[in-house]
Structures are given as C-alpha cells and as structure tokens.
Amino acid sequence: MVKKCKCKKKMYGYSDGQHEVWVCYNCGNFKGTAHGDEMFIDTIKSQPTIILAMIAEKMLVPMQE
C-alpha cells in the first residue's frame, strides 16, 4: 500500500503489529492508527520525534508494500 502526503511525496509505513505510523520524510507530516491505545496517540502527539527513535530502535519496522 502506497500513501501520498499532502505535499505529494510518498509516505513510508511502519508498524509494531498493533500501531501503524506513516511518515513523510519530505515535510515531516505523519499519520497513524493506534487501535484504541490512547497512550500511544498522546505520546506521539506531544513528542513526535519519538517516532524516529522507535524506528531507529526497531520498535517500529517497515511495512511490506
């Protein structure tokens, strides 16, 4: 699945099996689903750079296209 950002560039998907995050490396926009995990939503809204840390630590891994 390919998603396009509002800036018209490709968004890259990452998941941990429960959470799904789509990141645009061009403009920094991100979208995601937490499947009811409000704490995850609150955390990424207040500290969006944690997404990059989770990717670096392989807590979120690339989704298959």
Image: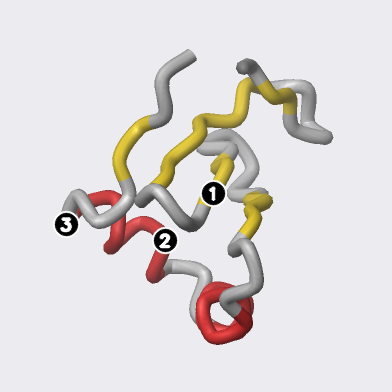
Q: Residue at x 59, y 49 (%)?
A: 28
Q: Residue at x 64, y 53 (%)?
A: 32
In this rendering, position of residue 48 left or right of residue 53: right
Tell me which label, 2 or 3, sits earlier in the chain.
Answer: 2
Q: Residues within 10 Å of mark 3 (few under 14, many from 20)?
A: few
Q: Which residue is mark 1?
A: 21
Q: Amino acid at mark 2?
A: Ile
Disc 2 secondary structure class: helix
Q: Amino acid at mark 3?
A: Glu
Mark pair 3, 1: CA separation:
15 Å
* Location of residue 39 with respect to 31 vertically, above or below: below
Mark pair 2, 3: CA separation:
10 Å
Mark pair 1, 2: CA separation:
8 Å
Q: Which residue is mark 3?
A: 57
Disc 3 secondary structure class: loop
Q: Residue at x 43, y 67 (%)?
A: 49
In this rendering, position of residue 63 left or right of residue 40: left
Circles 1 and 2: CB distance less than 8 Å?
A: yes
Q: Quadrant of residue 26?
A: top right
Q: Residues within 10 Å of mark 2 (few under 14, many from 20)?
A: many
Q: Amino acid at mark 1?
A: Val
Circle on res. 51: 2
Number of numbered callouts drawn: 3
Q: Position of residue 2 (x, y in %)?
A: 64, 17
* Location of residue 38 with respect to 7 vertically, above or below: below
Tell me which label, 1 or 2, sits earlier in the chain.
Answer: 1
* Location of residue 18 with respect to 8 vertically, above or below: below
Q: Quadrant of residue 22?
A: top right
Q: Residue at x 78, y 22 (%)?
A: 8
Disc 1 secondary structure class: strand
* Location of residue 8 with respect to 33 vertically, above or below: above
